[in-house]
Image: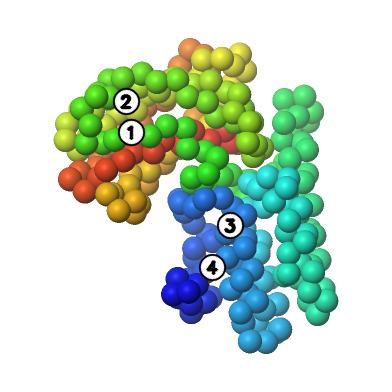
Amino acid sequence: NTNQNEWFRCDFDFIRDLLSTSNLVLTNEYRLYTAISDWLLARSSDTPILTYACELLPLIRFSQMLPIQLHQIEQSILYQRNNNEQIQELLKRLLYQAYRFHTLAPLRRDIDRPEFLPLEWYLPREYTEMNITDRVDIQSTLRFGIQVDVQTCSSPVPSVDRTADWKVVYRKRSHDKWTLKVHRHDETNETHAQVTAIIYDYERRVLQVDRGETFIFTTSNQYELEIVLNNPYEAKELYLLIKPVIS
């Protein structure tokens, strides 16, 4: 289709810059892998594939995939092809790092803090599949100052389970200014998390991404995210992401 052809025509530098972005809004990291895999396999010869793969694949955050998705990578065409053993070895190493993260990250409070470096590789991008915790109609007048209860994953390790409870207060201060207050209220230990607001227009296109720095939540504090809408009259919806992270 047209979108696929346009994707295949993207040059290497564009792809590399895309993968280097933390503010990338996408369904999940596995979808990014399949897109990059298709792009690599569309190259005409094995030499560019190997050269490009060695630079691009380490930029994919395998740590942010579900176990079933990591297993699917082992079954993928790029992994299974017989004529690129170097790519398979590279993927094996990256998958090992992801599995190690899944195993050890939940134990960081109990063992001698295992290192996860580079840190960026172990932090989530802006995933709209698992991390969306609430949605607000920006043009509505019903939610000014309204408090809502939301749930997220309880751990930095990706999961479909949502067992962590949060409270969020939305306050519209003017036609283009919002304040979001986020509070974790069910956890006795500290929770490191990032809060992101994604603004969509009426065509479901991303207008704006506002991401806060990693914040240490306790039951006695809260995080405030100030949002200034760049295009207040085009803005339709605000999606909130709360992402537990390692630090």
Dot 4 or dot 2: first in sequence order is: 4
Disc 1 packing (10 Å; few <14; some 14–19; many ≥20): some
> What amino acid is labelled 3 in the image?
Arg
Pointer 2: what residue? 170
> What amino acid is labelled 2 in the image?
Tyr
Dot 3 or dot 4: first in sequence order is: 4
Q: Nearer the viewer, residue 24 or 117?
A: 24
Q: CA distance from mark 4 to mark 2?
A: 36 Å
**Residue 31, labelled with which disc?**
3
Tell me if residue 91 can be seen.
Answer: no
Residue 56 location in percent, x, y?
A: 62, 67
Tell me if residue 181 can be seen.
Answer: yes
> What amino acid is labelled 4 in the image?
Arg
Dot 2 or dot 1: first in sequence order is: 1
Element class at badge 4: helix
Q: CA distance from mark 2 to mark 1?
A: 9 Å
Q: How many dots with numbers?
A: 4
Dot 3 or dot 1: first in sequence order is: 3
- Residue at (78%, 59%) from the top-left corner? 74
Pointer 4: what residue? 16
> What amino acid is labelled 1 in the image?
Val
